Amino acid sequence: MAFATPLSLKPAQAAVTKTLPPTAGSFDYQIGGPYTPAPDVQIVSRDHGATPAPGLYNICYVNAFQSQPGASAEWEQKLLLHDSTGALVEDPDWPGEYMLDVRTEANRQAIFQKVKVWLDECASKGFDAIEPDNYDHYTRSNNLIDPSDSEKYMKLLVDYSHPMNLAIAQKNTLELAGDAASLGIDFAVVEECGVIWPGADGPECPEYYAAFGDRIINIEYTDAGMTRACDAYAGVFSIVQRDVAVTPNGPRKTCSAGSSGDTQAPTAPSGLSATGATSSSVSLSWNASTDNVLVTGYDVYRGGTKVGTAPGTSYTDSGLTAATTYQYQVRRRTTPVTSRPRPTPSPRRP
């Protein structure tokens, strides 16, 4: 006889009943302004100032890591990021939009107090999930913000949203996708994972898929990116093509009926072993990871810290200390994550 897993609750504690977007549900990105969705649409993302679309799964867009364009005066100066000269650090793609300074616990809490008002608004209006934008702002902060500080702030948003039965998405930021589960992030909203960026060997969709499985909503802005995403993942996760301005009632395309889908997640590398050692180095080997779309190499970690990348199934780590024990891990990668351009900017809100 099978029994359901017991649910233990503290007195006065309510069970979290957040729901995730429908798997591979038809999506419309409406952060440029709300309008009546097409009959096939199941999921909509709208700005927190808008009203949810009746009867659909609604995602609430919040610019949580940067100021809105032209709205920096709404923030205390100490909560905005300044460089060594005292100048505000501006998003290079969005003039007038400035980084929020999440580098200290005091700042993170103060910023959160303002942003949580928007989260309350999302919950009171009946949205189902939160899309906090610019999680990747640290990549544009001139190396002033450490990604660990962005993650600490993201955790505040996660822990506040879940008790209100709101799921929460990771917006882009592939570099931190491996930490999503530990932070409690529920799904991903990504832009242009079908594009092959300059210097990359392949698109980003496979690596997002390795981290999130079918819990992905992808927006493409080009025909080439849309074709590539649909050919691999139609019917696996949500894919839509919008115009770059995300114009209300503007162009919207979905995958054609003939598109195939990648239903095979990449396997993990296995059989990690030491094949040789000297007083200052160790040689490693492992069994290959497989995927029916693309696996481009492996990241090697020593004691949880990345020490190198290997294109094949072997790696030699050097500069070690004799008579010392080291622990290693190997993680597959499906496209390079260095020198990645930012996806085509889309509007923050009307």
Image (spheres, rainbow, N blue to C red):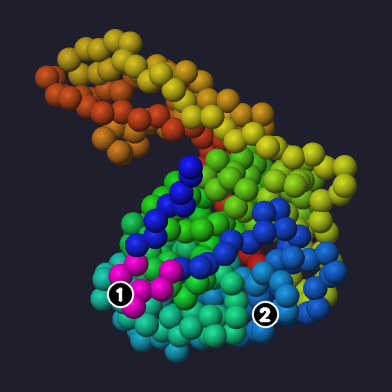
At x 87%, y 42%, the residue is 258
Asked which quadrant contains residue 158, the reply is: bottom left
Assess whether mark 1 and mark 2 are in contact (beta carbons under 8 angstroms).
no
Residue 35, percent across and down?
A: 78, 79
Is residue 124 one of those drawn in magenta? no
Badge 2 element = loop
Q: Is residue 149 left or right of residue 99?
A: left
Residue beneath the point at 58% across and 25% down: 290
Q: Dividing the image into 4 quarters, which one contains the C terminus?
A: bottom right
Residue flagged by tag 2: what amino acid is it?
Answer: Pro
Q: Which class describes the residues within 10 Å of circle 1: few (<14), some (14-19), or many (20+)?
A: few
Residue identifier under label 2: 52
Marking on residue 325: none
| Residue 291 visible in the picture | yes
| The stretch drawn in magenta includes residue 14 | yes
Q: Which residues are magenta?
A: 9-15
**3D distance between C-alphas at marks 2 and 1:** 33 Å
Is 242 on the left-hand or right-hand side of 266? right
Q: Nearer the viewer, residue 116 or 225?
A: 116
Is 13 above or below relative to 2? below
Of all residues, the one furthest to the bottom in this rendering is 74
The answer to which of 58 and 142 lies nearer the viewer is 58
Which residue is label 1 attached to?
A: 11
Count the labels in the image: 2
Q: Mark 2 or mark 1: which comes first in sequence?
A: 1
Quarter of the image for residue 304 reads: top left
Residue at (72, 58) in percent of width and height: 25
Where in the figure is residue 242, as x and y percent of width and height? 77, 63
Decide if residue 130 is on the left or right side of residue 16. right
